[in-house]
Amino acid sequence: MASTIRVRAISGGETTEVQVLIQHPMDSGFVKDAGGEIIPPHFIQELTFEYDGRYVFIADWGAAVSKDPYVKFSFKGGRKGDDLKISWVDNKGETDTTTAKIQ
């Protein structure tokens, strides 16, 4: 199965800018389907970014984040060719992890 995570990480001087798009329904548990039944909650709870053995960004999310979330941030460090590991875990125990090369 292909990863749900699309990443762009670009090193520029002393900082690395990261942009990520995650394909996930992010259902809040408050919306009804076409038949009037409530769609159960299904959302990412934790999103982590790891570089050189340390976390550079951690997000603890809830049901209020929109479908297919987009995240953009910068961190000090990161060199071209180095790996950036991205992982998420949702409330149903599903996970995804990918590693991107910093450009």
Image (tube, helix red, strand yellow):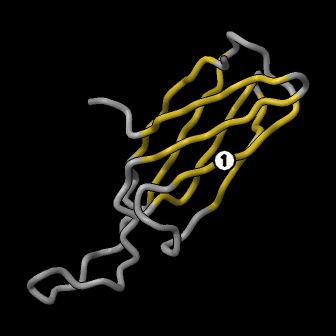
Q: Quadrant of residue 37?
A: bottom left
| Residue 79 position in % (x across, y down) | 78, 15
Q: Is residue 7 above or below residue 93?
A: above
Quickly name the residue at label 1: 72
> For this view, does 63 lie left or right of residue 94?
right
**Residue found 69% across the figure and 32% down from its top:** 50
Report crowding for label 1: few under 14, some 14 to 19, many 20 or more residues within 10 A (C-alpha). Answer: few
**Residue found 88% across the figure and 22% down from its top:** 13
Q: Is residue 27 above or below residue 8?
A: below
Residue lying farthest to the bottom in this orientation = 36
Instruction: Looking at the picture, tell me which residue is in the foreground, 16 or 97.
Output: 16
Q: Is residue 70 above or below residue 41?
A: above
Quarter containing the N terminus = top left
Kind of residue at disc 1: Lys
Residue lying farthest to the right in this orientation = 14
| Residue 88 position in % (x across, y down) | 51, 46
**Residue found 42% across the figure and 55% down from its top:** 68
